[in-house]
Amino acid sequence: MRGYYVAVMLLLLPPCLGAQVEVENIRASRAPAQSRIVFDLSAPVEHSLFTLADPQRVVVDMNNVRVRQTVPQPDPADRLLSRIRTAKRNGSDLRVVLDVKAPVRPQSFVLKPNGEYGHRLVIDLQALTQKGAPSPQVAKALDVSSGRLRDIVVALDAGHGGKDPGARGRKGTLEKDVVLSITRRLARLINDQRGMRAVLVRQGDEYLELRRRIEIAREADADVFISIHADAYHDPGISGSSVYALSNNGASSEAAKWLADRENSADRVGGVSIQDKDDLLVSVLLDLSQTATVSASIDVGASVLRELQRLGKPHKASVQRAGFVVLKSPDIPSILVETGFISNPSEERKLRTADHQRRLAKAMFRGLFGYLTVNPPPNTLLAARQHVIGKGDTLSDIAQRYQVPVDALRTLNNLSGDLIRVGTVLHIPDAHGT
């Protein structure tokens, strides 16, 4: 997130409070329509979040937590956050009050340690664009089974359809049929993964305008958008898969379109209405949203392409950039996958087979899941990085599901063997096994 950053290292107190978790650092950042406060903690915490009005406040209660000294205050230029206050509660708990300048929708999530930071509690304050009470969204640190964690939503767009058959192979294979079959197979893999859900943009052999495909993904609150195609070229010898993300020119043209159409549009950028904003502010919002989204799209695409390369030499060895309309949502990481050249006789034969379609779907799923384990959306099961052991689970199955080494699971959870108990919560290491 662009903006300012405030970092204050708080002074040490004597260890007289036993196992209390300590707030070691507080960092704040802002964007035009959002403010973020990050609490660096000595250990995970349980917390709750609610809002109060007259005056507008967001209250965060942390169990068994202490803060070491007076907290820093936000920059006066922050459009949402005016003051941060703390107080003891119930003897050992900490209450944080965030005074805000306007109604906000607060959201919280927790992050586990990585190479640079330890345990963190993140509070995002998002400006409300219409009247109504804020609806806090909270993900508790250790409460994976509480039902509060949402699924990661993946919008799958089978290219072409209906009156638009797409490319045609020499044997009469239609692109629209092949890619719908692959898309359905990928959807099944996603839906079989706990914490993930697929949305089919095209349910059957139907024609959809390109921008309608984006709208369907946005209506589903998709976290990722994948459009699946099968390429064609006049040279039948050309073969291999390719992955595309939005080009800079495509992003610029889309920004200009959104800016021009905003008066008659219900479109939103990063959850913020742009209808009543001036041109400069809309440009800033678009730049913030698109820069982050395109960067994430390239990362998703690179992860998917690495897995597709296991099936054979790709047509292009790196993520390509293009101005495809379906890649132009400014707030959803989006990629377009060309699964192969239907104009190549050998690839046409493979694309017609169920076995090759399954292999393509599995490769795309592995790439997508690999990206999401490292970059999980907030308030999702993958973001929590914990697994509640169910009946029939084995350590090797869990390791394969999260794509982490079995030895890393044992080490992180202090397991000496492979014996695990139903109901036990396993902590999941990151993709590097830490």
Image: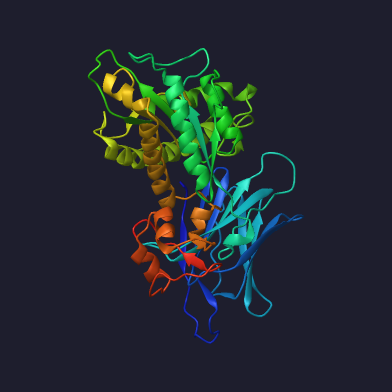
In this view, 266 is above or below 188: above
Residue at 53%, 23% (x, y): give it: 211
In this view, 81 is above or below 68: above
Residue 434 can be seen in this image? no
Q: Where residue 78 appears, x then y in whole percent?
A: 56, 50
**Which of the pair 162/8 is nearer the observer?**
162
Residue 202 lies in what quarter of the image? top right
In this view, 134 is above or below 360: below
Quadrant of image for the C terminus:
bottom left
Q: Which residue lies furthest to the right in this view?
A: 54
**Which of the pair 198/279 is nearer the observer?**
198
Q: Where residue 62 appears, x then y in whole percent?
A: 61, 69
* Position of residue 178 in the picture relative to residue 97 (left or right): left
* Position of residue 169 in the picture relative to residue 19 (left or right): left
* Position of residue 365 in the picture relative to residue 344 (left or right): right
* Position of residue 71 in the picture relative to residue 316 (left or right): right
Residue 193 can be seen in this image? yes
Q: Where residue 279 appears, x then y in whole percent?
A: 55, 28
**Which of the pair 197/382 is nearer the observer?**
197
Q: How is the image coloured?
A: rainbow
> In the rendered picture of this protein, how many numbered marks are placed on residues?
0
Residue 264 lies in what quarter of the image? top right
**Which of the pair 402/421 is nearer the observer?**
421
Q: Where residue 173 appears, x then y in whole percent?
A: 39, 17
